[in-house]
Amino acid sequence: MSEEYVINTNFSTDKYDFKKQSFPINGVSESSYYQANNYSAGTFPRTFRVMFSNANMIGDLDMPKAEAKNFIKARKDRYGSIDRKVPVKLTFKIKSLDSDGFTLKAELTNVTLYANKKRSKVLAEF
């Protein structure tokens, strides 16, 4: 139960909020889950879900206006479409197994948002 696990995924950003100077993040919520498969033998279920009890720890992507403009500009393709996907690393600990036998209740310990697919430039950490 003390071991940390990682899920690498993508979140998406909404349009920039000029009043808050941030991009709202669409990611994980208290009711969403990640589905995983167990390929090893044993008593653990073949397919299971991971749900996070503290998904509300993930905030918006704060960014000054000038930086936000450059961020969007770098993500536009030649047709003007904006890639709103942001690579994310979810680090978590398993807290319990739900009574259904295949839902793991977990607690996020760290969430890192990256600027690029190589995950070499950190945008924010929660």
Image (tube, helix red, strand yellow):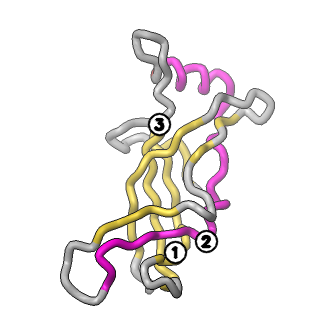
How far apart are the two marked residues, 2 and 1, measured between alpha carbons? 6 Å
On screen, residue 3 above or below 111: below
User: Considering only order in the chain, which callout, 1 or 2, is on the residue closer to the N terminus?
Assistant: 2
Residue at the spot 56% in from the left edge and 50% down from the top edge: 27
User: Residue 59 in magenta?
Assistant: yes
Looking at the rendered structure, which numbered label has been put on residue 39? Answer: none
Residue at the spot 77% in from the left edge and 36% down from the top edge: 20
Mark 2 secondary-structure assignment: loop
Residue at the spot 31% in from the left edge and 84% down from the top edge: 44
The residue labelled by disc 3 is: 85
What segment carries the magenta color? 44-73
Mark 2: few, some, or many residues within 10 Å (few <14, many ≥20)? some
Mark 3 secondary-structure assignment: strand
The residue labelled by disc 1 is: 106
The residue labelled by disc 2 is: 53
The single residue placed furthest to the right in the displayed view is 19
Horizontal side of residue 111 vs 55, given as left or right: left
Q: Are marks 1 and 3 in contact (CB under 8 Å)?
A: no
How far apart are the two marked residues, 1 and 3, measured between alpha carbons? 24 Å
The amino acid sitting under disc 2 is Ser
User: Considering only order in the chain, which callout, 2 or 3, is on the residue closer to the N terminus?
Assistant: 2
The amino acid sitting under disc 1 is Ala
Mark 1: few, some, or many residues within 10 Å (few <14, many ≥20)? many
The amino acid sitting under disc 3 is Lys
Q: Are marks 2 and 1 in contact (CB under 8 Å)?
A: yes
User: Considering only order in the chain, which callout, 3 or 1, is on the residue closer to the N terminus?
Assistant: 3
